[in-house]
Amino acid sequence: MSNKQNAGTICVQGGWKPGNGEARVLPIYQSTTFKYSSSEQMARLFDLEENGYFYTRLANPTNDAVASKIAELEGGVAAILTSSGQAANFYAVFNLCESGDHFVCSSAIYGGTFNLFAVTMKKMGIECTFVSPDASEEELSAAFRPNTKLLFGETISNPSNDILDIEKFARVAHSHGVPLVVDNTFPTPINCRPFEWGADIVTHSTTKYMDGHATSVGGAIVDSGNFDWEAHAEKFPGLTTPDESYHGLTYTKAFGKGAFITKATAQLMRDLGSIPSPHNSFLLNIGLETLHLRVARHCENALKVAQWLEKNPKVGWVNYAGLESSKYHELAKKQMPNGTCGVISFGLKGSREEAIEFMDRLKFISIVTHVADARTCVLHPASHTHRQLTDEQLREAGVAPDLVRLSVGIEDVDDIINDLQQALGE
Ligand SMILES: *Cc1c(COP(=O)(O)O)cnc(C)c1O
């Protein structure tokens, strides 16, 4: 009998494993520091020679328990929580790249990540080349340079809903001796486990479905433990040569499969400090306890809404990989047999103004800069998150000017459709 549990059990039981007489529910260790009786013991912790807690910026028991639940859900060996999804993606890349390095990224990614990679990291001397998620292996390969350190993509892109062919991207990354990093925010490990398709590192904005109730901004990075850093040691000196800021310790030698996450903790968290508060991790954990139930309901509702929208004469187009009309339907069925996510993008016939008036007429479906929580909500990227862009720039970013992003919640689906119907003026 395998002692690996299924996702639904890990959601409820993973992470916190109380001993005899300990709290059944994950406690909130709302403490910056931890007490020791010998100076020698504390010194060993500082040298990473012993496991233990001493300062919450480096490690905290509440944060660690939730990170280990997420690692288990993804089938990885180790994970770290961050204060936001932005911090998770930044750390995942910055843990492998330094000034003078380069990486390749699918162009179908979240706008905040695009800005981080294209503008902010460029100022740090790290360059990114964007490629279409639909590019052939030859086209993807052509974007690689001798100083390329990773390939990056989103399993399901926010907001354009494109599906990443993880096996194809992994093949190309591995043929160039670099890892594939995948942002798995939208499907969550309930619907897709990118490691099973060859990805090496997974990131999350836990702000979305994982928290699920729109209470806490947060992020996570998970390592599969599969990428052989030593086999490409010349590309990853940060992992495979001594770290002078840790007394000459070499991460791959000292920590094996834990090297990537230990380096992210010991260097990046130590120096940049984007930790979640233990209280937010506690809330995230409560969200995770029902993730498997909510994701299934989000998908069931979203498919019904997408099918209804597609039949509506006022709707020009619907992009949802669960629909047979989607060019990603077959790929989605392969990588995500139980469904994709609750987010649909669509456009109304007529002008950009039509979309705005439709949204203003919605009753309980609210206009918010958020996706992927229990409440159904909408956003018009061209008027909101991407409002500084011209129509031309919007198209380049893969966001149609008329695109409405509808995040279908877990309310009763008939009520969601009724609200959409009255807002369409029917
Ligand atoms: C929201 C989001 C992010 C950024 O996460 P924050 O938690 O808002 O910092 C990154 N990637 C994807 C796919 C997202 O949807």
Image (tube, helix red, strand yellow):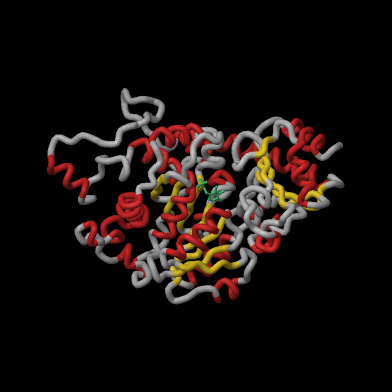
Q: Residue at x 63, y 45 (%)?
A: 341
Query: In this rendering, is residue 106 above or below 85?
Result: below
Give x and y (percent) for residue 411. 68, 31
Q: Which residue does the image show at 86% across and 37% down from the upper left?
A: 426
Say whether residue 207 is left or right of residue 39: right
Q: Look at the image and tell me whether residue 62 can be seen.
A: yes
Q: Is residue 162 left or right of residue 353?
A: left
Count the labels in the image.
Answer: 0
Q: Quadrant of residue 164?
A: bottom right
Q: Is residue 135 above or below residue 154?
A: below
Q: Position of residue 79 (x, y in %)?
A: 40, 48
> Residue at 60% across / 42% down in the picture?
370
Q: Position of residue 225 (x, y in %)?
A: 40, 56
Closest to the observer, 426 or 59:
426
Q: Quadrant of the N terminus?
A: top left
Q: Residue at x 31, y 52 (%)?
A: 271
Quarter occupied by residue 372 = top right
**Is residue 338 something that shows in the picture?**
no
Up-down relation of residue 121 to residue 70 (above or below)? below
Judging depth in this view, the residue of 277 and 264 nearest the camera is 277
Estimate the x, y position of residue 349 in percent, counting from the top left.
82, 51
Relative horizontal placement of residue 42, taking residue 107 as reference (left or right): left
